[in-house]
Amino acid sequence: CCLSFSLSIPDPQLREALMQLEASMQTGGQMVLTDAEQRLDALLFKMKQEEMKGEDFPPAMHFFRARHLINNSPIFSLLQKMPKGGALHIHDFSMVAVEWLVKNATYRPNCYMCSTDNRSIRFIFSSQWPKALPHCSPWVLLENLRAKMVNTTELDVSIMGNLTLFTYEDPESVYPSQDVVWDRFEQAFLAVWGLVTYAPVFRDYYYEGLTQFYKDNIMYLELRALLPEIYELDGSTHDIRWTLKTYQDVTKQFTAEHPDFFGARVIFTVHRGVNLTRMVEVVKEAIQLQSDLPDIMAGFDLVGREDSGRPLWYFREALSLPVKKGVTLPFFFHAGETDLEGSDVDQNLLDAILFNTTRIGHGFALLRHPVAKSMSRKRGVAVEVCPISNQVLKLVKDLRNHPAAVLMSENHPVVISSDDPAMFGSSGLSHDFYEAFVGFGGTSSHLGSLKELAMNSIRYSSLTPKQKEKALALWQKKWEKFVSENVF
Amino acid sequence: CCLSFSLSIPDPQLREALMQLEASMQTGGQMVLTDAEQRLDALLFKMKQEEMKGEDFPPAMHFFRARHLINNSPIFSLLQKMPKGGALHIHDFSMVAVEWLVKNATYRPNCYMCSTDNRSIRFIFSSQWPKALPHCSPWVLLENLRAKMVNTTELDVSIMGNLTLFTYEDPESVYPSQDVVWDRFEQAFLAVWGLVTYAPVFRDYYYEGLTQFYKDNIMYLELRALLPEIYELDGSTHDIRWTLKTYQDVTKQFTAEHPDFFGARVIFTVHRGVNLTRMVEVVKEAIQLQSDLPDIMAGFDLVGREDSGRPLWYFREALSLPVKKGVTLPFFFHAGETDLEGSDVDQNLLDAILFNTTRIGHGFALLRHPVAKSMSRKRGVAVEVCPISNQVLKLVKDLRNHPAAVLMSENHPVVISSDDPAMFGSSGLSHDFYEAFVGFGGTSSHLGSLKELAMNSIRYSSLTPKQKEKALALWQKKWEKFVSENVF
Ligand SMILES: [Zn+2]
Ligand SMILES: [Zn+2]
């Protein structure tokens, strides 16, 4: 009797061991830290405790309200300086802060604007006066409009507001539901479209995007890109191969000018609203591009709101083509960006894995799918976690409840990304790293977690093993510099 | 080459098998349903699809806003009629809808009321004019006050509003933070206190509580009770044993009058704000009561907000007493009702398990503690899930993100309870069952899930194996009647 009784008083050593075991299971939990790293970690721990004392805890707030708090946080400054590795889930036309689009793109000659019936705007560059758009006001030439104004600030601010979801108003009132926020998201996207698909802007926009990510201490990018037909001033257009080629050229130029930037690759994306016939065509195009330009082309994905689009299984014929033809087309599917449990769309997670996806975009619903979750872990299919995106698009309010907090407590393969930073008013990856570091892990996550997240972004990239080795070595050098410069 | 390629096209049969596997892993996933149950399940599935089509999805809304929608839901009517088994996590002074307190208790003679500095109220019954309370207005005798009024409705409504958190105003504005809502929670609790600790009200309140749960088709109760000293009109008080004995007497009376009600047991609770010396005393008292009145006494627990109280480990000396003395005192600890990950309080989950807790109250943070989670599963330590409580106390906004959705997808041992139904404006267990059934599982959960949840509430109760067998047989009869009456 007495043995079993005495076993029931918790043994402090066993308790300590179990706590240690749990701590070691998390992302970065088995990372061995150098002396300098340990000192930086102690500093970080103090900062985090300070941060959690405050009345307003940023990860519990909507990012639009929390941004100025985060921007003033010493943890955030440190995260900005930290080499974060690669950004693996970024969309083509939301790379660059909208200030640049307004101040640079819309100030170029021949830029026309009209206002749509549903309070959005559209742009076009044209050497001739463009034909009127349906459901849009008559075009105005922006240089004429601005010439008549004493002060163009108000106009510029109003244009800017149309190109992003970010607002200083109460985000809960402005975006009361998922439907509203997705609708505004798509409108902002269409507003940006006419600017960024104009060839000269297109090149510069991408170059500026690389610059902004580089400045945020990101060394590598995998860009989900729609590869649209890019237009010139005379209305002529380039084909999709030209677009991909341009990405390759600009990347080469940027990398040549910034030798410590590792590069970028493109994941060709198509909207999930297309029908099966079109999808078959697109997959064939993708296969061709993959075989013609394998250096820049990383693979294929579908985009657009999962809840209102067609599930992956609907496209199974198209998505089986590469395997049937015996050719390579890596997939990087968005899946489980939903809270409609048990619906057709909710099967995307499992189907993404069955179609051998390389990574999962979002995977917000993964915890509710134990089979898909265990397959993702066993096969090393990393989840691309975009905390701010999920919050702004209203999947979760308090980021401490984000499912990735659980994934990270088990060291499930994850990377942190920012999805559409310009749309959400975030920059590079630092804001999302802040939410993940401070919000997901509470005081349990530490410098080892950050280190592992950064390394994951190279480990789970589409690079070849040899390239990964090179990229990791480059990152390691940056990391050591970062640690030595920030430890006192 | 070709074999491995052909393996990569998802096999529809494998896909189907994996989906089935996942479905079978959830709570109730392996329940075999009779023909009648299958027909009821089909009906439920249709109802749920209807429910998910609506513009407002109740589990995504604050319960205070969603209540009228839920009350009109056909799923809710069915859940009210469904025999739900036992309610295992209910607090003593929040059992009875506040209407009863106002309409019954405050209309009794000798009822005095005062208004506190911080916009709450206090009550006392007394044969003489009571002594003034600090920070409270002079006492008024309610019968005098009401006698002077033409219409007492407004007064009654205002009293009611002070006894509950429920409000028709915007809950986000009224309760902007966890601190505010916990403060109002404690004030409402103190307002109720003077009413329910008056001996005649105390008996009737508990009897009324059993009645309300019985009407909600609950057949068994485990009540977390503070066992305060109950007072009489002359100011004399009864000891804690009298209070426990009274629970036993009223339970016996109620069960005699309602032979299909199985009974109730009491979990003695103490506020976690006490110091160690006091805790040692209380645990000794609990041991004594457990040995003297083992039929009514189920065990011991600590209550009050975890985040501001002392962690279990602080009380380890007191909590080790039963084992050291070689006596039985089952624990039913609240633990992990927090989002302060990595704090001392966040260790309560592990410590509760190390102290051999029989169940875990809330366990909201369990997913972030893989070691504690796996111990809870292996040892069959069920989690008492209280969805509405967690939402009102601001741990989670959209109940689809509640961690129990994940626990249920893995058939982790869980029971559904309502914590403080009167405080939250819910009744019995039906509102919480609605949130769990519609919110957690989406369309994946089904009648088998409900059946398993009801059976869990007996399986994981504090009853002896023999009693459980008897209770399950009684429940089974009720269940069959319910199915046959609701299937067409
Ligand atoms: Zn995306
Ligand atoms: Zn409780």
Image (cartoon, coloured by chain):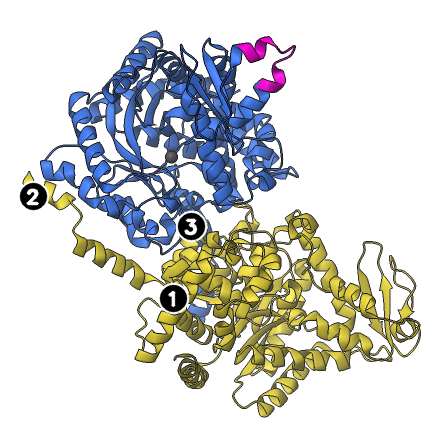
Chain colours: A yellow, B blue
Q: Amino acid at mark 2?
A: Leu
Amino acid found under the numbered disc labelled 3: Asp
Instruction: Categorize mark 3 by other alpha carbons within 10 Å: few (<14), some (14-19), many (20+).
Output: many
Residue B241 in the image, given as x and y percentages of width and height: 23, 20
Q: Nearer the viewer, residue A192 or B237?
A: B237
Chain letter, disc 3 residue = B
Q: Which mark is residue A201?
A: none
Q: Nearer the viewer, residue B198 or B347?
A: B198
Secondary structure of the residue carrying numbered label 1: helix
The amino acid at mark 1 is Phe
Instruction: Determine if marks 1 and 2 fall on one subunit.
Output: yes
Q: Residue at x 43, y 57 (%)?
A: A405
Q: Is residue B186 left or right of residue A134?
A: left
Q: Nearer the viewer, residue A234 or B59?
A: B59
Q: Where in the image, quadrant-wise, is ligand 1 located?
A: bottom right
Q: Residues within 10 Å of mark 2 (few under 14, many from 20)?
A: few
Q: Are marks 3 and 1 on the same chain?
A: no
Relative to residue B389, is residue B217 depicted above or below? above
Q: CA distance from mark 3 to mark 1?
A: 18 Å
| Spot occupied by residue A311 in the image (x, y as percentages of width and height) | 59, 54
Residue B409 is inside the magenta segment: no
Q: Position of residue B235 (x, y in %)?
A: 34, 15
Circle number at residue A3: 2
Q: Nearer the viewer, residue B349 or B243?
A: B243
B475 lies left or right of B358 = right
Residue bearing mark 3: B339
State which chain disc 2 sits on: A
Within 8 Å of ligand 2, the CB of disc 1?
Answer: no
Q: Which residue position holds label 1?
A: A45
- Rendered-image quadrant of the N terminus of chain A: top left
* Magenta stretch, residue numbers: B144-155
| C-alpha span from label 2 to label 3 | 36 Å
